[in-house]
Image (cartoon, coloured by chain):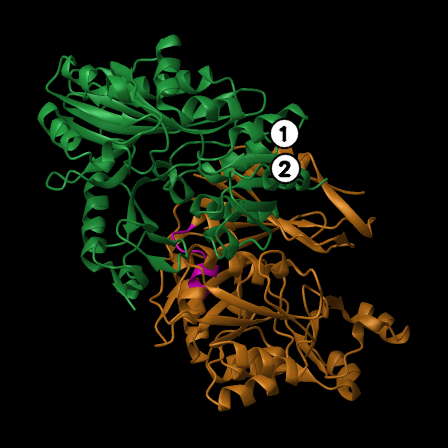
Chain colours: A green, B orange
């Protein structure tokens, strides 16, 4: 019997999930409030509606054999109710309850002896005093809920915090409270994709490293495998796998970690879905993160996670100065470079920092990858039309 | 401006063309008389109609920026007329005029000094006498037109021919006449995909070898690169490239050749479209044959044709004893084998020898590939439902 996968969210992750299922003609239905969302470019089965709308979620459940989500911000209560009626939801919705709230997430790591940076959960009324008594001059301030793509996460000094407080700045207003967290010290940021099948057997991918631009301090690109030594990479994979196994749920997870110069490894956070840091697996690995999730959803055996070639992935993001329709310039020049794969998400308009696509570069070593990356970067331009 | 590719035919080649264009959101429209054709599983834009219907072809032309075909049996006159109005058709329809008629095709090779086996074009009235005077006892008899997937091509002895003639056998009835052709001697069959861009620059893929079952004498699987020595592979690639360049047309072409034990290489025939022998490029090569054709159609630069890993491709065909709905058995067992990629064409029913899908196996050497192949073969079963 051919099964139908219901997906909450119809963004690029949903689109790439569909693309991975296409060779075997897997059926999908996407719930998404935006018409012409990325997934709708490839799949004609879309339910228009909010990811918080219980009725729409139930409708999706009724039409699907199994449900998953490609974004964390969904109505978890509705998913839990559906699960209780016997509808498989993967990952389990209780994982979302833990992950949606960064306070619960940090407590979960503490309870399960998963190394994570020291933190304090703080309510609005106590925030000022909690920060005053925080032992370090600099710290990370996170909203407990609703942060996404770096929103709701700030690196601050006590002074900077006071200024924001005085100005009643929007960036520190969080109705659900805060996490104050210790800064990682001279750390490399890595990510590990871990897949867990319906029998709770797990398998992990090679760690991928996030490389930051030393000037802007923004993420520049991702490289797999990470440039850390083999022993460290193995230790990272082990911690990531143990973290994901603690959730006792099938699914595909991305674990973000800090690896300090002193060798200490801390779990930062987990995304219970395909992740930016696993895009490269489409071209670089025997089984992509998307095919892997399809296998899990369809109760098929896990695929080989080995890397065939080293890879770099870089996002195509909307520039600061453009809002509206756009096009990618110099595409033909870029396509001349061997081993470069461009993915465009088909979004009609750009806005500052909006993810419009990504590209993956294959190569046999870091030098070759970075040379190609520099060529692509010089060429690739998002321009308004 | 986003371009639309119009495709005559909506079979599995069209489906895989769409899949290759999906990451960059290429638009397609398929003309195909069968509802629920393989391409329609992934693309909602289908014109229902015959590939011989001039009006439907014109309608497709009106909606598309560029036209191509994934099957040779189309109305060439209609395409030539469209081309004369300025609509790009790739490959050029005059290539189809040559290829659709095996007599013209053989004459074309002779005229262009392309090595091909000795042949005689024969009309129905002269067939008997032409065969009588043919120098060899065994020969190949081909219908000039309409052959497909081995139909209309027979290896015969003079005796066998006489029996068929006496019985007025259907298999030797060809209203457009015949080709009598010399049999290749102790030959290996290979195929080369050659891509030609809109500036008529060409690039070729590594030769792929067709391996036949010694018992049934039917094609068993395809292996890339061919197991011939490097020098021979280079010679094959050169002849294939020269053959395709003779057509002076952009497009993606598959050149099938015979390589005799005595070292002689002969071109058998050319398919002006993606080909079975290029399916493996989806997983094995930097640029798949489908992405390559998309690049050509969109006037983008040609992609790197290098092989990343060795590969075997094997067809999933309908067994002799089943007509009707079917399913693939042991799929989960097969998915446990690393480096195996299954493509199903989504055809609702099977019939004897119908191509239902294919699988590609990646590996580093022939032994590894054949070991995996034997495992898959033991498992994969098409059963009726």
Seen at 52% across and 29% down, the residue is A76
Report the side of B361 relative to B230 (left or right): right
User: For the residue labelled by badge 2, is the local secondary structure a helix, a strand or a loop?
Assistant: helix
Residue B19 x %, y %: 51, 55
Residue A45 x %, y %: 60, 52
The reply to whether the magenta stretch includes residue B288 is yes
In this view, the residue in front, A278 or B137, is A278
Tag 2 near tag 1, CB within 8 Å: yes
The reply to whether the magenta stretch includes residue A41 is no
In this view, the residue in front, B127 or B191, is B191
Position of the N terminus of chain B by quadrant:
bottom left
In this view, the residue in front, A285 or B98, is A285
In this view, the residue in front, B70 or A50, is A50
Between marks 2 and 1, how big is the CA–CA gap? 7 Å
Seen at 71% across and 66% down, the residue is B34
The crowding category of the residue bearing disc 2, from other C-alpha atoms within 10 Å (few below 14, some 14 to 19, many at least 20), is: some
Asked if residue B339 can be seen in this view, the reply is no
Report the side of A126 relative to A193 (left or right): left
User: For the residue labelled by badge 1, is the local secondary structure a helix, a strand or a loop?
Assistant: helix
The crowding category of the residue bearing disc 1, from other C-alpha atoms within 10 Å (few below 14, some 14 to 19, many at least 20), is: many
Q: Mark 2 points at which residue?
A: A58
Report the side of B276 relative to A381 (left or right): right
Chain of the residue displaying label 2: A
Q: Name the residue under label 1.
A: A82
Chain of the residue displaying label 1: A
The span shown in magenta is B285-293
């Amino acid at each position: 019997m051919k099964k139908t996968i219901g997906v909450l969210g119809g963004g690029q992750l949903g689109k790439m999930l569909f693309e991975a299922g296409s060779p075997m003609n897997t059926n999908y239905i996407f719930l998404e409030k935006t018409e012409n969302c990325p997934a709708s470019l490839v799949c004609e089965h879309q339910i228009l509606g909010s990811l918080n709308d219980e009725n729409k979620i139930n409708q999706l459940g009724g039409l699907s054999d199994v449900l998953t989500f490609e974004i964390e911000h969904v109505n978890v209560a509705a998913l839990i109710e559906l699960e209780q009626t016997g509808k498989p939801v993967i990952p389990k919705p209780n994982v979302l309850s833990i992950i949606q709230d960064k306070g619960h997430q940090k407590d979960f790591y503490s309870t399960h002896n998963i190394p994570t940076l020291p933190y304090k959960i703080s309510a609005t009324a106590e925030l000022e005093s909690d920060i005053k008594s925080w032992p370090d001059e600099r710290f990370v301030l996170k909203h407990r809920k609703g942060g996404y793509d770096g929103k709701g996460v700030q690196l601050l000094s006590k002074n900077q915090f006071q200024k924001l407080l005085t100005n009643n700045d929007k960036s520190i207003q969080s109705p659900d409270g805060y996490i104050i967290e210790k800064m990682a010290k001279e750390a490399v940021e890595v990510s590990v994709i871990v897949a867990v099948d319906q029998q709770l057997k797990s398998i992990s991918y090679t760690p991928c490293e996030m490389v930051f631009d030393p000037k802007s301090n923004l993420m520049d690109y991702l490289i797999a495998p990470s440039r850390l030594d083999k022993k460290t990479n193995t230790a990272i994979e082990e911690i990531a796998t143990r973290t994901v196994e603690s959730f006792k749920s099938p699914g595909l997870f991305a674990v973000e970690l800090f690896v300090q110069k002193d060798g200490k490894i801390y779990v930062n956070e987990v995304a219970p879905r395909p992740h930016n840091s696993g895009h490269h697996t489409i071209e670089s690995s025997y089984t992509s993160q998307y095919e892997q999730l399809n296998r899990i959803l369809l109760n098929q055996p896990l695929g080989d996670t080995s890397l065939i070639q080293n890879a770099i992935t870089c996002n195509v993001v909307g520039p600061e100065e453009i809002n509206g329709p756009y096009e990618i310039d110099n595409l033909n020049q870029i396509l001349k470079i061997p081993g470069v794969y461009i993915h465009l998400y088909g979004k009609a308009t750009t806005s500052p920092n909006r993810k419009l696509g990504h590209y993956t570069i294959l190569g046999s070593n870091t030098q070759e990858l970075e040379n190609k990356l520099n060529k692509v970067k010089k060429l690739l331009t998002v321009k308004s039309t």
